[in-house]
Amino acid sequence: MLPRFFKLLSIFPLPVLHAAGVFTGWMVYALSSSHRMRMRENMERAGYLSLLPAAVAEAGKNIFELPFIWCAKPARVLKSATIHNWDVAQAAVDSGRGVIFLTPHLGCFEIIAQAIASRTPLTALYRPPRKTILRPLLEQARARGQLSLAPANLSGVRTLLKTLKKGGAVGLLPDQVPQQGEGVWADFFGTPAYTMTLPAKLQQLSGAQLVLSYAERLPRGAGFAVHFVAFDGKLEGTPLQQTRKINAAMEQLIARCPAQYFWSYNRYKGLLPEVLA
């Protein structure tokens, strides 16, 4: 039922979906106390609470643009994306050392992989959804053209490393909370967050280059501005120092369009009460 509903929604123009998303965003904010509390707490930690009304609307857009991104024809989806500074990514691809694209939960992060795969083959780390009804929809939507998926397990990590050693490109969401034992506690907007160490490990084992990316949602459903940014410096030191540097890079990207970050995401999951105090 849900896949059919998504396919039906994908027929509508993006401005209509985003308008419906704004309404839905406020409905969810009003009806879900846990969603409301987490969103406010996360934004307050980061110093962006004044942008709460805009963030509520953007969160709703994030939900309603998914049918378009996942189910519309690839040519139509890519037509909505204007790519900026691809030369940064192309230089990394041309180096032959492999590329690790790091994309936070910022703007329309679901379109990033398709945008990259339209220009170079990409293997993206993929965590299957908890609801099995969504799995066929997501896998079909995310594995298009030159885009392939690697599961978030040991086999998938091996696939990523193999791809990098061949000079290929992989994609990760570095602000996604990892499984226990796969990360370290590193500051994210001044509060410790359990952060994956995988990007740094892959970079050190392969010598690949890091490229940051995000897709800014344009006003009134006009589409998305996909940006590529060179990673500043090298990942050196301890795993904690490496993850802090990655988190700092994510903070800088978020500062470019802070209302579009996925603030309701449980980024500080597992945080001990004494740490929050």
Image (cartoon, rainbow, N blue to C red):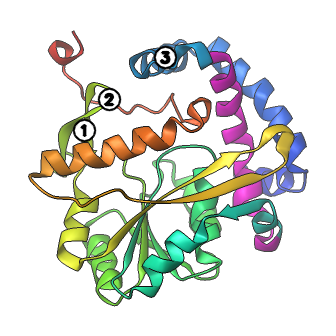
Identify which residue is drawn at 24% across, 61% down: 234
Q: Is residue 234 above or below residue 6?
A: below
Q: Which mark is residue 34?
A: 3
Dot 2 or dot 3, earlier in sequence: 3
Q: Is residue 101 above or below residue 225?
A: below
Dot 2 or dot 1, earlier in sequence: 1
Q: CA distance from mark 2 to mark 1?
A: 7 Å
Identify which residue is drawn at 69% across, 50% down: 66
Magenta residue check for 86: no
Quadrant of the rendered structure where residue 72 is?
A: bottom right
Between 135 and 260, the residue placed more toward the observer is 260
Start and end of the magenta stretch? Answer: 52-75
Residue farthest to the left? 238
Residue farthest to the top? 277
Q: Which residue is mark 1?
A: 194
Three-letter amino acid code at disc 2?
A: Tyr
Indicate the position of residue 202 as horizontal and vertical percent values: 24, 69
Between 195 and 50, the residue placed more toward the observer is 50
Secondary structure type for disc 2: loop
Magenta residue check for 65: yes
Q: Which residue is mark 2?
A: 268
Secondary structure type for disc 1: strand
Give yes or no for contact between labels 2 and 1 (Cβ–Cβ under 8 Å): yes
Whether residue 179 is visible to the viewer of this picture, yes or no, is no
Identify which residue is drawn at 63% across, 68% down: 114
